[in-house]
């Protein structure tokens, strides 16, 4: 079986535990590549140092099937002049991914990167927003206060809904094919017998 390609976007203080279940479900069917603003070690929310094996400017969108953005504080990077060129590059790549129908999945604060890039404009979405200033990023989208939202090829989720995020991403990417598989996997991840 030919594996698909999934990219996990890393940035300082990204919330690692929110994407672990999703990565678990994709691991047998997808090659996983870590990508960041630049190559090198990135410190996570749980204080793990994880290496971004490539920089965002090196992403060839044609090769990507899935692009995952964990939670964190995107607004701190978007508002930081030091990252302005990197943010523009990320915005371009996200728009290219969306235009080409690639699966884009973001959880917790991660959707703020999507909103900033404009790819949530006119779409339904959700996120975990912790300050009033962050709401402005979502003014052109229809924000839903729900665990997850799937709008076309874009999956967004609130941070506490990491199990549902994982299951919906696996379903969207073709890993889980039936409603029964979805329910069994959801129960397994939640440790429900």
Image (cartoon, rainbow, N blue to C red):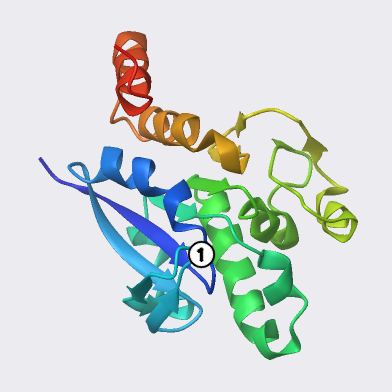
How far across and down, in percent of the image, does residue 10 sit? 46, 68
Q: Residue at left 28%, top 31%?
A: 175
Q: How crowded is mark 1: few (under 14 residues within 10 Å), some or many (20 or more)?
A: some
Q: Residue at left 76%, top 30%?
A: 145
Q: Which of 15 and 123 is in front in this view?
A: 15
Q: Is residue 183 left or right of residue 46?
A: left
Q: Residue at left 61%, top 59%?
A: 95
Q: Nearer the viewer, residue 118 or 108?
A: 108
Viewport quadrant of the C terminus? top left
* Residue furthest to the left: 1
Q: Residue at left 54%, top 69%?
A: 13
Number of marks: 1
- Considering only vertical position in the picture, is 88 above or below 136? below
- Does dot 1 land on a helix, a strand or a loop? loop
Viewport quadrant of the N terminus? top left
Residue located beneath label 1 in the image: 45
Q: Quadrant of residue 117?
A: bottom right
How far across and down, in percent of the image, does residue 85 sit? 65, 85
How far across and down, in percent of the image, does residue 134 sit? 82, 57
Q: Is residue 83 left or right of residue 64?
A: right
Q: Which of 176 and 72 is in front in this view?
A: 72
- Considering only vertical position in the picture, is 6 above or below 54? above
How far across and down, in percent of the image, does residue 151 sit? 62, 32
* Residue furthest to the bottom: 82
């Amino acid at each position: 079986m030919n594996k698909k390609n999934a990219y996990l976007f890393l940035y300082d203080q990204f919330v690692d535990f929110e994407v672990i279940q999703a990565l678990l479900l994709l691991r047998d069917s997808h090659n996983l590549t870590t990508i960041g603003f630049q190559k090198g070690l990135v410190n996570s929310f749980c204080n793990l140092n994880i290496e971004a094996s490539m920089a965002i400017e090196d992403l060839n969108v044609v090769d990507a099937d899935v692009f995952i953005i964990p939670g964190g504080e995107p607004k701190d990077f978007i508002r930081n002049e030091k990252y302005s060129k990197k943010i523009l590059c990320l915005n371009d790549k996200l728009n290219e991914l969306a235009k080409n129908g690639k699966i884009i999945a973001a959880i917790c604060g991660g959707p703020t990167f999507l909103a900033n890039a404009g790819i949530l404009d006119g779409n339904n979405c959700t996120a975990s927003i912790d300050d009033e200033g962050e709401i402005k990023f979502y003014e052109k989208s229809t924000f839903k206060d729900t665990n997850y939202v799937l709008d076309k090829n874009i999956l967004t989720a609130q941070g506490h809904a990491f199990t549902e995020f994982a299951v919906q991403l696996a379903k969207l990417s073709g890993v889980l094919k039936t409603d029964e598989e979805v329910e069994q996997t959801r129960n397994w991840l939640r440790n429900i017998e």
